[in-house]
Each structure stands twice: as structure tokens, then as C-alpha cells.
Image (tube, grey):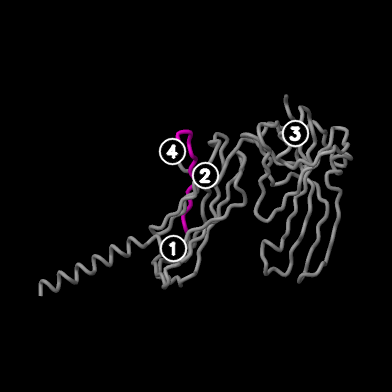
Amino acid sequence: MKKLSFILIFIMLIGSLSSCGAREDRFELTYESDRTLYLVGETVKITAKVTNVSGRTYTYKGSSSDYRPYVNLYPILEDGKVGEPLEHLPIASTTDAPSRHKIEDGKSGQVTFEFPLPEDAHIGKYTVSLSYEGAKKVFVGAISVIRPAEQNHVEDMPYSSVTVSSGEEGIHPLRGLLYTNQYLNGELALCGDGYGVYWFFDSIYDINIENYPCIVLDGEITVTASGNVQIGTPYLYDFNYERLDYNGGFEGLSALPAGEYLVVFTEYHDGSLDDPDADEYWKTMYENLFKLIVRS
């Protein structure tokens, strides 16, 4: 009898250890962020998702909002080690009484964490860490933070969410509408046109060229946008708003001779990519503008 009891306990122990060892395989952890590059002073938004991939129903006791992963954002310091995690804004939770919840195989839960970047935020790479019930996944260097270039930010001017950077500094260029089209059930329903950067060239907006967003070349020029935004190739103007003969792309900007240039590029938003099942969406094209200084 004692021998049988010992065998049963041994089998239960092995099963328990096996279950613990496989815990990370029960859940898939993924995330999305609107961008991979942020300026100091902005807020990093990370939407994390946990999915039950165990092949069976998962049961937990708690509130209905507890089925969601936790997110940490760590700076990678100069010595390669990680620093203290950034503080995030409060996360909304349900207040229902704890109860048992069943999560079927393939079902997901998600949550959005927001991390404001303080003025003294570390400049460089950041690691995103996701965790849920013993499962953990780490994305090393997935987010980059740079300093905003010193410039005059003019109130009530339309700025793009696209980030243009060189070295450790970046800007948001001015943005002028070229056109926008509304679609209902796949058919064009409404359209509108704008003037693109000529809103600024013709002084329809009261802004001087000295106040254009400006970046000083420090290596390559990088343009970072969210996933559903398409960026066009740049074209150049001089300070008399005369278009220059240039077709070198963004990579060719670093080879320009010393001088000051106006750089213009298109930014295209296809709203149908946000939700393929949506009956209503917009397709919009903008022109973006910034000033580039190339020093000898």
C-alpha cells in the first residue's frame, strides 16, 4: 500500500513539474506599437496581446479584465544592461467580483500601456517585456528614443506624426493636405483637395521659413511612420521655393553638398488597412515639409 501511494505521489509530482515547465508554451505573447521611434516628451503606446495556445480551455479566478499581459519598457544602458523600467499611465480595470473565467483555446486578451517619456529619458534603445502567468517574451531594442531637435514649434500649425531623424535628434515635419477620399462599401462617396506644401510656400499659413522644422544632418536621414502609412521619395526645393534636380531618395540626402534645403515627401494613409471589414474608410495623401542643413 505504501509503495502504491509513493508511485501515485511520484506520478503527480512529475505531472506538476511538466505542467510548470510547459507554462510558457500555453500562451503566445505579442505586441504592436504605433511607431518604433519616439522623441523625448512623447508617449510610447504599446498594445500587448496574450493568446491561449494550449489546445484546451484555460481557467482562472479573478476579474474579467485580468486576462491580459503585463508590459514593461526598459532602457538599454551604455554597458548593455537594462535600467529601471519606465512608469506607465494607470490601466483601467473592471470592478466585478472575482470569479472563475474560462478562456477557450485560441482566445486572446489585450491591453494598451502608455509610457510618457520624461525630459531626462534615456537616449537610445529600449526593450519591451511581456508577461502573463509565468509566460514571458522579451523584444530587445525594439523601441528607440531620440532627442527632439531644437526648433520653434509654431502653435496651430499642422504637424505630421511621422518622425524624421538624423543621429540622436528628430523632428515632426509640417504637413499639408493634398487630397482625401471617403469610401462607403468600397465605392467613392466623398472627395476633397488641398494644396500640399504650397499652403506654406504661399504663406496661407502665417509661418516664416526660419520656423520650419529643421534638422542638421548627422549621418543618414531616417523616416519612421506607423504601419499603415506609406512614405514617398523626397524631392528638394531651395529657399526661393524653386524645385531642384534631385532623385537620390532619402539615402542620398547624406551626400548632398553643404547648404540648406527644403525637403518634401508624401505621406499616404489607407484607412482600409486599419480594419479590412470596415464599410467606411478614408484614403488620404499629404505632403510633408522640413528644412535640412548640411554642414561642410
Residue kind at label 4, given as amino acid type: Lys
Q: Which of 59/251 is in front? A: 251
Residue at x 84% of width, y 34% of height: 238
Residue kind at label 3, given as amino acid type: Leu
Separation of disc 3 and disc 1 at Cα? 47 Å
Q: Which of 45/20 is in front? A: 20
Label disc, if present, on residue 81 of the rendered structure: 4
Q: Residues within 10 Å of mark 1 (few under 14, many from 20)?
A: many
Label disc, if present, on residue 141 of the rendered structure: 2
Q: Residues within 10 Å of mark 2 (few under 14, many from 20)?
A: some
Residue at x 75% of width, y 53% of height: 268
Magenta includes 78?
yes
Q: Position of residue 181 (x, y in %)?
A: 81, 61
Part of the protein shown in magenta: 69-81
Residue kind at label 2, given as amino acid type: Gly
Which residue is the site of mark 3?
A: 292
Separation of disc 3 and disc 4 at Cα? 35 Å
Residue 170 occupies quadrant: top right
Separation of disc 1 and disc 4 at Cα? 27 Å
Residue 135 occupies quadrant: bottom left
Residue kind at label 1, given as amino acid type: Phe
Q: Position of residue 97 (x, y in %)?
A: 42, 66
Disc 3 is placed on an element classified as: strand
Which residue is the site of mark 1?
A: 27
Mark 3 in CB contact with mark 1 (< 8 angstroms): no
